[in-house]
Image (spheres, rainbow, N blue to C red):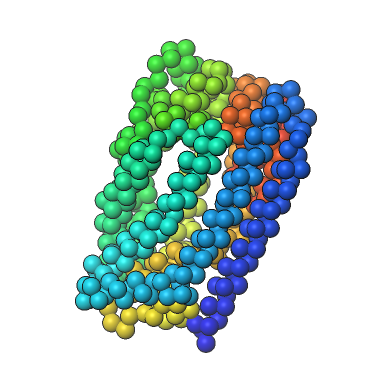
């Protein structure tokens, strides 16, 4: 009875989320196309109509592609669950290994990840070498694409498998409160990655060189003194070898914090505009947005692990998703996989809450930047970034409210101009 009820709920939420996504996507496409011919008045003197139309076409192409990907991913999800894909994979591994021990559990997750990655690979390839290429953003070679793929796979194995082993061991041996210990391990791992990523992992994919522009460096250092931000260094990243998109960010934790500029950003913006963009990013740090997000992530992950702690012992959780739990041995790896598949379906309608919080933080970071730099510099930088990244100036309001982590361009710039 519980199994059937859970299956019905899962299918209902699955198709509800599918319907909402297609409804929002179709609204977005229609709205963008309806405003394609004319640049919004606020930007009419700053962005050419050709750039505006390119942004509209790019947005429509990305939205259509995302909807196609959604359909196929939904079909894959159904194949893994109700059509017996995970069950067949489990049986094949048991026949090969002969016992449902730790090797079986790790291989089950690794095989699932490999199959999922293989299905996603053609979409990644199309996105990079067809979609991004068509609009002039792709700078990546095919050799680099597959080199990145190999590096990511090896990193996933080297880092992910030991972490999985620890989590699965806790699930099996640490009693009913295993999820608390697993949460402590996972949280510690996330904090460790904040320290190691800038200096150990990121350099495996990109080259980071110290900022050599003395004029810009002095301007940035003066900004950091004004806002009280200590950095390990100022670096330029060779983002242009993969994409024409530009950005700036800071990464790391504690004494390992470093500021990174994409070379594409420095090539496009003036020193004053770069300073304003960085002031916005530093605003996120000084206003404790990063710490708040980390705390929310940790709290939500604790709640989800507690939920998994309950679900992993419920037979209906497995059978409701097309899997027969093993009568002997551990089902922990299967529980992890099913949980990862089911969770996004049941939490999808909560997405606007995260988007709303993120947009609030963006407004606050803009206000911080205006206090420490000039608002017109930030406005001109944003206009250039909207144009260079082909970001639509006319998103559908409801689609934007549901998905977008940043406020619409017109709303954001109107606020900045009002602050001058």
Find the residue positioned furthest to the top: 215
Going by the image, does 172 lie left or right of 370? left
Q: Nearest the camera: 78 or 404?
A: 78
Q: Does 322 appear above or below 117?
A: below
Q: Does 30 appear above or below 214?
A: below
Going by the image, does 230 lie left or right of 92? right
Which residue is painted at 54% across and 42% down in the image?
131
Find the residue positioned furthest to the left: 98
Q: Position of residue 406 (x, y in %)?
A: 61, 41
Res 97 seen here: yes
Which residue is painted at 55% across and 17% down in the image?
270
Which quadrant of the structure image shows residue 235?
A: top left
Q: Does 269 appear above or below 149?
A: above
Res 183 seen here: no
Q: Nearest the camera: 34 or 311?
A: 34
Which residue is painted at 66% across and 22% down in the image?
376
Q: Does 332 appear above or below 217?
A: below
Q: Nearest the camera: 187 or 355?
A: 355
Point out the image quarter for the C terminus: top right
Q: Position of residue 117 (x, y in %)?
A: 39, 55
Q: Position of residue 413 (x, y in %)?
A: 69, 31
Going by the image, does 136 lie left or right of 213? right
Which residue is painted at 55% across and 21% down in the image?
269
Which quadrant of the structure image shows residue 15?
A: bottom right
Q: Position of residue 35 (x, y in %)?
A: 76, 39
Report how many numbered discs are placed on residues in the image.
0
Q: Nearest the camera: 160 or 154?
A: 154
């Amino acid at each position: 009875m519980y199994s059937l009820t859970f299956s019905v709920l899962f299918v209902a939420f699955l198709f509800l989320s599918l319907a909402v996504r297609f409804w929002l996507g179709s609204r977005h496409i229609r709205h963008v196309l309806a405003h394609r011919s004319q640049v919004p008045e606020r930007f009419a003197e700053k962005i050419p109509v050709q750039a505006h139309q390119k942004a509209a076409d790019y947005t429509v192409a990305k939205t259509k592609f995302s909807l196609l990907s959604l359909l196929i991913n939904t079909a894959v999800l159904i194949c893994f669950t109700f059509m017996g894909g995970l069950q067949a994979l489990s049986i094949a591994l048991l026949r090969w290994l002969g016992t449902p021990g730790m090797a079986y559990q790790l291989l089950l997750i690794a095989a699932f990840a490999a199959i999922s990655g293989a299905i996603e690979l053609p979409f990644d390839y199309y996105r990079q070498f067809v979609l991004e290429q068509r609009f002039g953003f792709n700078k990546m070679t095919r050799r680099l694409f597959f080199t990145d793929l190999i590096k990511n796979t090896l990193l996933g194995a080297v880092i992910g498998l030991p972490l999985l082993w620890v989590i699965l061991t806790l699930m099996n041996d640490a009693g009913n409160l295993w999820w608390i210990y697993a949460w402590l391990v996972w949280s510690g791992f996330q904090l460790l990655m904040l320290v190691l990523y800038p200096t150990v992992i990121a350099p495996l994919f990109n080259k980071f060189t110290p900022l050599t522009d003395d004029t810009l460096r002095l301007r940035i250092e003066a900004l950091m003194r004004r806002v009280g931000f200590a950095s390990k260094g100022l670096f330029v990243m060779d983002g242009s070898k993969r994409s024409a998109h530009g950005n700036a960010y800071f990464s790391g934790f504690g004494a390992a914090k470093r500021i990174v500029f994409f070379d594409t950003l420095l090539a496009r913006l003036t020193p004053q505009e770069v300073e304003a963009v960085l002031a916005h990013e530093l605003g996120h740090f000084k206003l404790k947005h990063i710490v708040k997000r980390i705390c929310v992530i940790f709290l939500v992950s604790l709640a989800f692990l507690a939920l998994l702690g309950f679900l992993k012992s419920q037979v209906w959780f497995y059978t409701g998703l097309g899997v027969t739990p093993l009568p002997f041995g551990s089902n922990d790896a299967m529980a992890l996989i099913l949980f990862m598949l089911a969770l996004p379906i049941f939490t999808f309608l909560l997405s606007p809450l995260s988007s709303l919080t993120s947009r609030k933080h963006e407004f606050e970071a803009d206000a911080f930047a205006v206090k420490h730099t000039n608002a017109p510099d930030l406005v001109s930088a944003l206009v250039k970034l909207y144009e260079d990244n082909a970001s639509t100036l006319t998103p559908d309001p409801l689609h934007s409210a549901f998905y977008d982590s940043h406020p619409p361009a017109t709303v954001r710039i109107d606020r900045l101009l009002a602050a001058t």
